[in-house]
Amino acid sequence: MKQTIMIVDDSKVNRDYLGAIFEANNFAVLEAGRGGEALEMIEITQPDVMILDLNMPGIGGLETLRSIRAKGFNFPVIIFTSDNREEIKHRCMQAGATEMLFKPSKPNQILSLIHKCIVSSSDSPAKI
């Protein structure tokens, strides 16, 4: 069975870029253009990993992440942002991010991080 990656980014260009990388590497891809849309989707289909943009209109990435963790979902969430300030990284990790991925990233960096997160999460207990 294919593993599922949810891409949450208001930029269609970013969703298309990431989606093409993941589909070419045999992942199933779900897309959401807003944080609220992603929160609705995970109630129906939990991804194996989520790639989450920080800066989105409406419910931003950090608020989306906090909501995911408050609901008890523990799948890996990788924050995908161009903001590499230490303060932002600290806030994301405190909110429950698994990893940070900075824009722009090359396909091999992205895939390596995805595989690392999948392996790590398979060693953790799942949500009950």
Image (cartoon, helix red, strand yellow):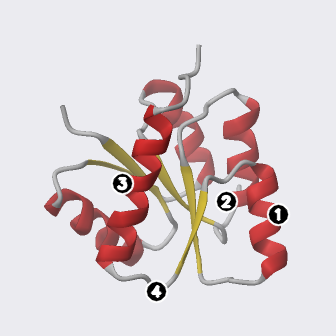
Q: Residue 104 carries which label?
A: 4
Q: Earlier in the sequence, mark 1 or mark 3?
A: 1
Q: In this rendering, does residue 28 appear at all? A: yes
Q: Which residue is drawn at 53% across and 38% down?
A: 75
Give the amino acid at mark 2: Gly
Q: Earlier in the sequence, mark 3 or mark 2?
A: 2
Give the amino acid at mark 3: His
Question: Please, what secondary structure does the residue beneath circle 3 have?
Answer: helix
- Dot 4, crowdedness within 10 Å: few (<14), some or many (≥20)? few
Residue 67 in which image quadrant = top right
In this rendering, the answer to whether 33 lies above or below 38 is: below
**Residue 98: image x %, image y %?**
61, 53
Question: Toward the viewer: 88 or 68?
Answer: 88
Residue 111 in which image quadrant = bottom left
Q: Earlier in the sequence, mark 4 or mark 2?
A: 2
**Residue 31: image x %, image y %?**
39, 53
Question: Please, what secondary structure does the residue beneath circle 4 have?
Answer: loop
Give the amino acid at mark 1: Arg
Left or right of 69 in this view: 1? left
Q: Residue 115 carries which label?
A: 3
Left or right of 28 in this view: 57? right
Q: Mark 1 points at which residue?
A: 91
Marks 1 and 3 close (CB-CB < 8 Å): no
Q: Residue 61 carries which label?
A: 2
